Image: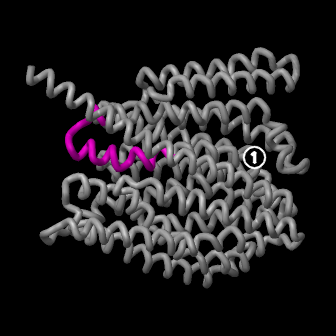
Amino acid sequence: MAALTSTATAEEAGREELRGTARGGLVNLVGAAVSGFGGLAVTWLAAVALSPAEAGAFFAATSVFLLAGAIARLGTPTGLVYWVARLHRNGRDGAVGSVLKLGLWPAAIVSMAAAFGLLLAAPMFQSPDLVRLIAVFLPASVAMEALLAATRGYRLMGPSVLIDKFGRTVAQLVGLGAIALAGTASPFTITFAWVLPYLPAALAAAWYLARRHRRSRTDQGFPDRVSARAFWGFTAPRAAAGVAQLGLQRLDIIMVAALAGLGPAAVYTVATRFVIVGQMASGAVGQSVQPRAAAAMAAGKPASARSLYQESTAWIVALTWPVYLGVGLLADWYLRLFGGEYVGGDARLVVWILVPAMMISSACGVVDSMLAMAGKTSWQLIDVSISLVVNVGLNLALIPSMGVVGAAIAWSAAVLVNNLIPLVQLWRTFGLHPFGALTRRALSAAGLGFGVLPLAVAPLGPLWTTAALAAAGLAWAVALLRYRTRI
C-alpha cells in the first residue's frame, strides 16, 4: 500500500511539474508569437522602406550586434537559470546573491569592453556609422538578457515575456513604423529605432530582479554562497557554446554580405526570416523547461526530465511544422510579401532547402537545453563548435560560387549536425529522447495535414494548396483546443 501511495504521489508530482511547465510555456508562447511575428514585421518594414542594399546594411549591422552580445554575455543567462533554479529548489536562496554577482558583474564589464572594441573597429565594416550606433546600446542588451535569465531561474516567465518579448518588440515596431510612415527611413534611423528599446528594457529587468531578490533574501537566515569555480565551471563552456549557437543563426548573413554583397544579404535575410517563428516557439518552450529540467536532474528524477522533454517537443512540433510546411508550399507568396525584388529562383531555393532542416530541428525539441541542464555544457560546447566549423567551412566554399543558395546549404547542414549529435548523446547517456507517444502523434498529424494533403492538390494550382492548408489549419486549431488538457 505504501508503495502504491508513493507511486501515486510521484505521478501526481510529475503531472504538476508538466502543468507548471505548460503554464510557463503558454506564457512564453504568447510572448513568442508577438516576438516572432514582430521579427518578421521588422524584416518586412526594413525591406519595404529601404533598398535591398540599404536593408542588407541594416540586417548585417543587427547581426553584428547580436553576435557581439552573445560574446559579451559570457554564457551567463544559462548559468544564472541553472544555478538560481537549483538553489531556489534546495532552499538555498541566500546563495543566489553570490551567483548574481558572479554572473552579472563580469558580463557588464565585458559588454562595455566589447562596445569600446566595436567603436574602434567600426571603420573596418561596410557601414561604420551603424556599427558605432549599435555599440552604444550593446551593454544594455547584455544586461537585459542576463537579468531576465535570473528571473527565469525563479520559474517566473512573466518578466521575460512582458519586458523583452512584448515591450521591446512592440517598441521596435512602433519606432520603425513611425519612421516608415514619416518617409524618413534610412539605415541609420531604422537601426536606431531597432536598438533603442534595449535600454528601457534593461532598466525594467534590473528593477524587477532587485525586487524579487530582496524578497527571497529576507527569507534566508544563514550565510551561503556558490564558489566562482563552481559557477564558471558550468557557465564557461556555455559562454563559448552560446557564441557559436548564435553564430549558426547570424554569421551567415554577415558572410553573405562580405562575400556576395549587401543586396544578396537582404535577399537571404528575407528568405530565411520564417525560421524566426520556429526559433521563438522553441525558445519559449525551452525557457520554461530549463529550470524544471535542471531541478529534475539535480533531484535524480530522469523520468520527470524525460516527460518534460517529450511533452515540450510535441508542443514545438505542433506549433512549428504547420508554419514550415506552409511557407515551403507557398514560398513565392511568402517572398512577395517583402516586395517583388525578393521573389526569384534563388530565394525560393533558400526556403526549400531550409524547411526540411528546420522540421528535423523541431522534432529534436529542446535538445540543446536538455544537454545543458544535465550539466554537460562541455559536450554542448564541442557539439556547437563542430556545427559552427561545418557552417563556416561550407559558407566559405559555397557562397562565392552559389551565393545565397550556398549559404542555405551550409546553414541546413550545420543545423542537422547541431541537433542530431546532442540527441544521440542524450539518448545513450541519460536515456532521454523526444519521441514519446504524443510527439509521434503530432509528427504524423502535422505531416499529413500540412504536407501530404496540400501536396496532393498542388497540381491543381496554388489556390487549392492554400485552401488545403487553411482547412488543415482549422482542423489543427480544433484538435489543439480539444486536447488542451493533454498538451
Residue at (43%, 39%) from the top-left corner?
22
Q: How many marks?
A: 1
Is 482 situated left or right of 377 in this image? right
Report the front residue among 147 and 424.
147
Q: Residue 5, relative to residue 51: is it above or below? A: above
Which colour assignment does the render follow?
Answer: one colour
The residue that label 1 is drawn on is 271
Q: Specify the segment rendered in magenta.
A: 283-304
Q: How dense is the environment of label 1, judged by Cα within 10 Å: few (below 14), some, or many (20 and up)?
A: many
Residue 302: in magenta span: yes
Is 263 situated left or right of 392 in this image? right
Residue at (55%, 61%) from the top-left corner?
164
Q: Position of residue 230 (x, y in %)?
A: 23, 63
Q: Secondary structure at mark 1?
A: helix
Residue 79: in magenta span: no
* Quarter of the view holding residue 254: bottom right
Q: The residue under label 1 is which amino acid type?
A: Ala
Q: Is residue 418 visible?
A: no
Residue at (86%, 44%) from the top-left corner?
336
Q: Residue 441, relative to residue 297: is it above or below? A: above
Q: Is residue 134 visible?
A: yes
Is 328 situated left or right of 460 in this image? left
Report the front residue among 267 and 389.
267
Q: Position of residue 216 (x, y in %)?
A: 27, 65
